[in-house]
Image (cartoon, helix red, strand yellow):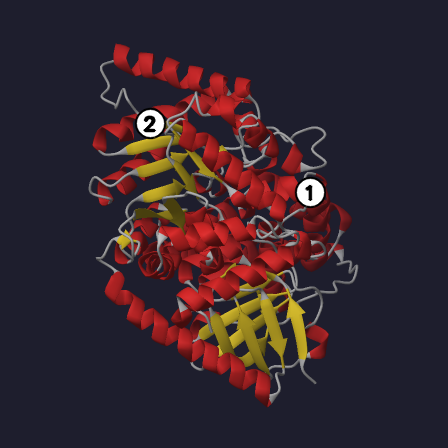
Amino acid sequence: MMRKLQGIAVSPGLAIGEALVLDIEGFSIPRRLVTRDAVQQELDRLHKALADVGEELARNRDAVSRELGAKYGAIFEAHLQILQDSGLRNDLEELVRQKNYSPEYAVSRVVRRYAELLQKVRSRNLADLFDIEKRLLRNLLGRPREDLSNLRTPVVLLAHNLAPSDAANLDPNYVKGFVTEVGGPGSHTAIIAGALEIPAVVGTGPFLQEITSGTKVIVDGHEGIVVLDPDDETRTRFEREAAARRFRAARLETLRDLPAVTACGTRVELFGNIEFPDEVQHCADRGADGIGLYRTEFLYLGAQREPDEEDHFRAYSKVVQSMGGKPVTIRTFDLGADKVPHLPDPEDERNPFLGLRSIRLSLRHVPMFRRQLRAILRASALGDVRVMFPLISTILELRHAKMILADVMEDLEEHHVPFNRNLPVGMMVEVPSAVILIDLFVDEVDFLSIGTNDLIQYTLAVDRSNKDVVGLYNASDPAILKLIQMTIEAARRKSVPTNLCGQMSASPTYTMLLLGLGLRQLSVPPSAIPEIKKICRSVTIEQCEAVARRALTLETARDVKSYLRGELKKCVPDLVP
């Protein structure tokens, strides 16, 4: 019987195919004791499993680094570091030697104890720990690991959760999409799915017990919709939409070297959002005008030590030089304290979204912040670099960050290190307080970038990774439109360039609205550039302004979205299924 699920879209695209249901692997390990004369034999078995899993992780690290780049391979280096941790190994050996536990039971007990500690601080390393547990138990129990890299028929993967190691082994030629019951948009798995451009939906809630391998599945990575066992009518409708999208994508490739100029002659700049240096090529392939958002978090998430200045500089300089003089906007790290391995865990971080994160963390740990700023400034001597501070909520935060930047500049000058003294400095507008005081902020910065992902979350009080309230997380909400309008108008009064870099800018539904509100810069994932460029080249600013005026009068998010889709269909019918 057909069933429709709503999850969180983490990688756009449409996939239709037969399901491959992965083993949930809810290992049930009984409390088994071994005899004293068998302890050494069991320790040998444990050591062999640790060595085998270590070799497997090292192979994955090297293979993924070759295929996707070193920063993706760093995920497995982090797993290897956890596996080789002397504390973990000592705890495992002690349970076997002192308690006479079997290696399987020791692994289960130790990992669960570690998991309880990580859960208390909502650490992102929890999934990495469980991935290691699964590998060790597979080895000890003699269960063969499902080798997803050897698939030879197209499938849609369905799983309770997909470990980063599994996601990185997926072959887009055969894995047409994947769906998980749990997970959120910020996970390693979601990041890898986006890099591979595999349609993916996560956080659907339980459904695996109702489906078997071979069942037809539809994955809509644009809307976060999954259809299990679709009827003929539904399947035909999605097949037509998938074919239409492929045809549109082929036609849009012809726009690669054309500028995003509206039908009335207004130039719109389309920038790319990237996570890793290797993604620069995706931007170049789609004709991006530059990098509007270079996220720097993975330098920290993929490492067991703090990245030093040279680590930062190598990553930034590669991007700047690859862009050949086009602008590159580097955002300083946007992480919580619980996500930075070398920092002490926060003592009372019950809600990381409202805690010590982003610019607050930078200002708390100034030496770490200075190292990043030094590397950004050094990279600015190689091309058109801008720096941007995230999650600014007060004027004092911005001034403090700028003061540290100025101090780093003086230090570089003293040591005769080249950099751009006129480096443009900007801030993210992603909390309501920044919009309310936007008239103050525009006097302090060279540019603004509206981060709608967090702006929606904080304005509507919705955790954007929580599937239970995901329906309330809506870019079409009238409150969001008014905050964007207020920001753009304040920036226009002071001639401060304004960009928008959240997921909202990547959706064709909102392009006319955003142009009508006055935006002339958009920063989007590379895969979204062709569609957004097509819309820009098909409409006039007068049309867009009329759309924006009307949208601002509507009272509900549903009405706004319905209206915007209708207007897009009228103006650019070949982009709307």
Query: Left or right: 138 with respect to 53?
Result: right
Q: Residues within 10 Å of mark 2 (few under 14, many from 20)?
A: some
Q: Residue at x 37, y 62 (%)?
A: 531
Which numbered disc, 1 or 2, marks the residue that appears first in the sequence? 2
- Closer-to-camera residue (328/310): 328
Choose top left, top right, bottom left or bottom right for residue 329. Answer: top left
Quadrant occupied by the N terminus: bottom right
Amino acid at the residue labelled 2: Pro
| Image coordinates for residue 313, horizontal then vertical, percent | 32, 32
Amino acid at the residue labelled 1: Ala
- Closer-to-camera residue (9/256): 256
Residue at the farthest top position: 414
Query: Is label 2 in a helix, a strand or a loop?
Result: loop
**Label 1 sits on residue:** 461
Choose top left, top right, bottom left or bottom right for residue 86. Answer: top right
Q: Residue at x 27, y 10 (%)?
A: 414
Query: Left or right: 337 with respect to 315?
Result: right
Q: Which mark is residue 424?
A: 2
